[in-house]
Image (cartoon, helix red, strand yellow):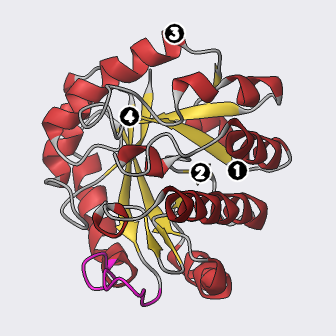
């Protein structure tokens, strides 16, 4: 593993940028993507103020430039953008102005559904949970088809939540694989749930055959928010690749 395409700093909900770079060096990486959360427009869950990279990306860019002088790593000035279908025009306009080196597009919520917390699903019946899952994958497929982003983030995010885990079907993964096969967007093998649930990655290892069958390649992202997460998740990703029937592509080849 040469490049971690997905990490967070204090410009969203992560750790000090310089400490994250040091951890990447310690993990033996050549490059680190700094992909702080970015919510372009107001959202119904009130997270716009917390994830305000839309206002602070130039300040962070200055910090990235400073960090580049102190490390041998390649540091990418990038972002993880929360995709909302109805806001595609605003997102496209912002990205054309911001000029990130690459972007990850992720679905964190869709309409009334929030996929970052269990709260609204704890007392929900199976039909409601399955409806939330279907809406999630509808949004993921639309994200891929939009061609707004270079990378698709944690493509089965609901698997992090115990209340929604297991409600994704092989047909859901097949839909995403078909969309990716016809898109410039590349998914990530994401280690965001390595320390949270079942020591697994995204997408679920049992569902990878569809992606291989459609010739879909992956980049690798730790989705780390702390130096300890980064150094723990790099070897976990490397082990997952060794076990998985997927093809990995390096980020620099996508951006060249």
Categorize mark 2 by other alpha carbons within 10 Å: few (<14), some (14-19), many (20+): many
First in sequence: mark 4 vs mark 1 = 1
Picture layout, residue 233 above or below residue 5:
above
Is label 2 in a helix, a strand or a loop? strand
Residue found farthest to the right = 182
Q: Is residue 255 visible?
A: no
Whether label 2 touches label 1, CB < 8 Å: yes
User: Residues under labels 1 and 3: Cα distance?
Assistant: 24 Å
In this figure, what is the number of numbered marks? 4
Q: Main secondary structure of the magenta part?
A: loop
First in sequence: mark 3 vs mark 2 = 2
**Residue 60 placement: quadrant:** bottom left
Disc 1: which residue: 185
First in sequence: mark 4 vs mark 2 = 2
Categorize mark 3 by other alpha carbons within 10 Å: few (<14), some (14-19), many (20+): few
Q: Residue at x 30, y 58 (%)?
A: 65
Picture layout, residue 124 above or below residue 48:
above
Categorize mark 4 by other alpha carbons within 10 Å: few (<14), some (14-19), many (20+): many
In this rendering, would 122 be left or right of 149?
Answer: left
In magenta, the rendered stretch is 41-52
| Image disc number at residue 152 | 2
Which residue is more in the foreground, 216 or 107?
Answer: 107
User: Residues under labels 4 and 2: Cα distance?
Assistant: 14 Å
Disc 3: which residue: 243
User: Residues under labels 4 and 1: Cα distance?
Assistant: 19 Å
In this rendering, would 131 be left or right of 114?
Answer: right
Disc 4: which residue: 191
Q: Is residue 138 visible?
A: yes
First in sequence: mark 2 vs mark 1 = 2
User: Residues under labels 4 and 3: Cα distance?
Assistant: 14 Å
């Amino acid at each position: 593993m040469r490049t971690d395409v997905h990490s967070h700093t204090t410009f969203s909900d992560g750790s000090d940028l310089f400490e994250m770079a040091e951890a990447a060096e310690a993990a033996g990486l050549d490059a680190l993507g700094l992909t702080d959360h970015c919510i372009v427009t107001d959202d119904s869950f009130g997270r716009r103020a917390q994830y305000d990279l839309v206002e602070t990306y130039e300040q962070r860019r200055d910090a990235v430039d400073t960090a580049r002088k102190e490390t041998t790593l390649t540091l990418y000035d990038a972002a993880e953008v929360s995709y909302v279908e109805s806001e595609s025009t605003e997102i496209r306009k912002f990205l054309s102005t911001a000029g990130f080196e690459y972007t990850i597009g992720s679905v964190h919520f869709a309409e009334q559904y929030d996929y970052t917390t269990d709260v609204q699903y704890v007392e929900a019946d199976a039909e409601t949970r399955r409806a939330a899952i279907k809406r999630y994958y509808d949004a993921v497929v639309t994200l891929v088809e939009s061609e707004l982003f270079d990378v698709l983030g944690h493509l089965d995010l609901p698997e992090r939540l115990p209340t929604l885990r297991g409600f994704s079907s092989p047909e859901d993964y097949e839909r995403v694989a078909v969309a990716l096969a016809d898109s410039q967007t590349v998914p990530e093998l994401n280690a965001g749930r390595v320390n949270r649930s079942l020591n697994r990655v995204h997408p679920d290892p049992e569902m990878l055959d569809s992606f291989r069958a459609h010739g879909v390649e992956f980049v690798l992202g730790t989705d780390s928010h702390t130096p300890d997460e980064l150094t723990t998740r790099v070897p976990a990703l490397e082990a997952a690749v060794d076990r998985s029937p997927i093809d990995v592509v390096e980020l620099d080849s996508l951006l060249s």
